[in-house]
Every structure is written in structure tokens, then in C-alpha cells.
Image (cartoon, grey):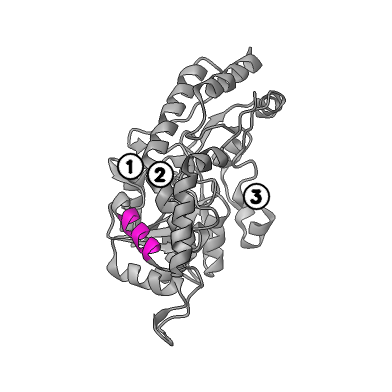
Amino acid sequence: MQVPLMDLKAEYEVLKPEIIEAIDEAISSMQLFLGPNVQALEQEWAELCQVEHAIGVGSGTDALIIALKALDIGPGDEVITVGWTFIATIEAIVLVGAQPVLVDIEPDCFCLSPELLEQVVTPRTRAIIPVHIYGHPADMDAINQVAAAHDLKVIEDCAQAHLAGYRGRPVGSLGNCGIFSFYMSKNLSAYGEGGMITTDDDGLAEKTRLLRSHGYTSKYEHALIGYNSRLDELQAAILRVKLKRLDWGTQRRREQAAKYDELLAELPIALPAVAPHATHAYHLYTIRTSQREALTAHLEAHGIAFATHYRYPAHTQPACRPYGLHRANLPETEKAAGEVLQLPLHPYLSDEQIEYVAQTVGEFFA
């Protein structure tokens, strides 16, 4: 049996008639940027995240850059985040001219450790970017408490956490702003690139709208030096079709994770932890084992796809060395890098496939 890590083709076959119709309508209108689909998606996403504003941009990375820029963070400033994230989180900080400062993660849920925040705050610190990794939210109350004590901004990196929750509230509504990615691997994915910024701050929302489109205020007039980062109508039309099934897809992921938990419970591996404050969105189903390399070879031999995010954490990457990030003291991050393993999980995965994966993992340890 072949078991893919994700299956975009299966989703497309189900939604194909609606998607083709939505694309045709968007192109026929010839309102290809910031038109009715973008405006409707922004409203729908704002309602989903329980915020006043959602601003569509070109990608999740652009969302991070624009959010930082809109908060006036730049050269001479420090921004605290984690090394346990896709490099875009750190990349955005560098691209606005600020200095990333890294703290370690909690070993159970892989999110930023609030206990370590106070140790790295300096007079130059301007913001914190907690990453809701794999679909598990960071401990936002504790993070916001530190931020409030030092007058710091909080940007939630929700790129992997669509519909995740924290103490009954959706992620993206818990800081000064939140950012989302609609890259193809995400729980809500475009057929290209797309991102969203969420906020309750009217002024911040207005500034992000200016920044995403060259600072444009009216025909021939530009108030700011901005970016070319408009979410296009085609992607918005596709996302609106898929959004109708996001709640169903997220519930399927939770059911599948529960089934994995049950089938793998007796094995000598660490299963995904869920903190009492968290509602997990299961972007990825991540286990830990000290025998990862041998286990992945076993899975590959049996036709089972897998991933190892993040085998090489961001702070170990050559791109981050000029910023001194290789000197960061991140023991939990580096330990996790040698142990994490993602098993197949997506809404179109069958019970038979889950049972086969669990059986194959069990045979390895037997």
C-alpha cells in the first residue's frame, strides 16, 4: 500500500466543478486584484478569526514582512522568536533590517517557551513572534504578559494553525496581529501563493493595506513606500471554495490524530502533546523517537511517506550565520531536530491507511 503524506489531488477531484466555475467567474470579471473575491475572503476570514480586519497579501512570508513594517520595526530593533520554525519567520525579521533573537521551545508542544522570554529581552527588543507550530498554539497568556511588561508588540505566526484555538479563542486574535499562509501544504491552501494578516487595530489594518499595494491611496498617489503583495482574485476564488470545507477538514484531522493516538499508544514513541489551553489543528501529526533514521527507512520500504520538520533548525542554516544565530543556546530545539517525525495526515486519508501506517510502525518496534 502507498500512503502519501498529503493528497491535493483527492481534494481537487472532490471540489473540481466548484473550483473551475469560481476560476472562470473570476477571470471573466477581469477584476484580477483586490476584487470581490478578495474582499469577501477577507470578511469571511475576519469572522472566522473573530477580528475586525483581515488583509489579503501575496504570501505568508509577505504577511510577516508587512506586519513587522506596519509596526515600525526595522534597523536597530530586536525581535524574539524561535529557531523551531520555517526560515520565513526569521527571514522576515532580517528583511526589515531587525535582528532576530532566538529562544528555545517547550519539548512537548514545540512552541516558544514563555519562561525563557525575560532572559532575552533588552532595551532594543520591540516584538515577539510566537509560532503556533504544527497546529498547536503557543501559550499566549504567558507571552502576552511578558510583552505587556516590556511594551512589546506580538505577531502571531499562524501559518500552520488555521482553526487552532487558545482558551476558546481562535489564533490570529491573540496578539497585535496574526499572519496566515495559504501555501499548498497548509490546511487551507491556494493553487499558488497567498497570505492573510488579521488584527483588531484599525490603524494597523489601514497601514497594512497601504503597504501591500505600493502605498497606493488613490490614482497616481502613494502615501508610503510599500510592496507589490496583493492577494489575487484567482487564489481568493479558490480559497473561498475550499474554505467551505475547512471546518470539516480540520475535524477530520482531529479524528485521524485521535485514531493514531489510540493505535500507537503502547509503542515507545512520544505522541503529539496537547496542552490544556490548546485546541490543536493538526497541520502535521508529529511523533518523537530516538530511532528515527531506522524507522524512516522502514516506512519508506513499506510505501509510507513521511517528513522530518525540522531536521535542520533555522538557526543552524548557513543563511542565518551572518546574524549570529548559530550561537543561540537551544538545547531542546536541537534535541527535537534529531527525533521528530511526521506521519501521513490529511482529510482524505482513509482509516485503512491509518491502520496500515500504525501497523507498520508497530512492526518496526516489535
The residue identified by callout 2 is: 138
Question: CA separation, marks 1 and 2?
Answer: 8 Å
Q: Amino acid at mark 1?
A: Tyr
Q: Is residue 199 left or right of residue 364?
A: left
Vertical comparison of 251 with 97: above or below: above
Question: CA separation, marks 3 and 2?
Answer: 22 Å
Q: Amino acid at mark 2?
A: Ala
Residue 25: image location, x then y, percent: 44, 60
Q: Circles 3 and 2: CB distance less than 8 Å?
A: no
Give the tally of numbered discs: 3
Does label 1 or label 2 sit earlier along the sequence? 2
**Marks 1, 2: nearer the viewer:** 1
Answer few, some or many: residues within 10 Å of disc 1's Cα (few below 14, many 20 plus, some between 14 and 19). many
Magenta stretch: residue 85 in it?
A: no
Q: Residue at x 53, y 62 (%)?
A: 92
Mark 2 secondary-structure assignment: loop
Quadrant (top left, top right, bottom left, bottom right) of the C terminus:
top right
Q: Amino acid at mark 3?
A: Thr
**Marks 3, 2: nearer the viewer:** 2
Q: Is residue 332 left or right of residue 167?
A: right
Answer few, some or many: residues within 10 Å of disc 3's Cα (few below 14, many 20 plus, some between 14 and 19). some
Does label 1 or label 3 sit earlier along the sequence? 1
**Marks 1, 3: nearer the viewer:** 1
Which portion, as a residue range, is magenta?
A: 36-46
Q: Circles 1 and 2: CB distance less than 8 Å?
A: yes
The residue identified by callout 1 is: 166
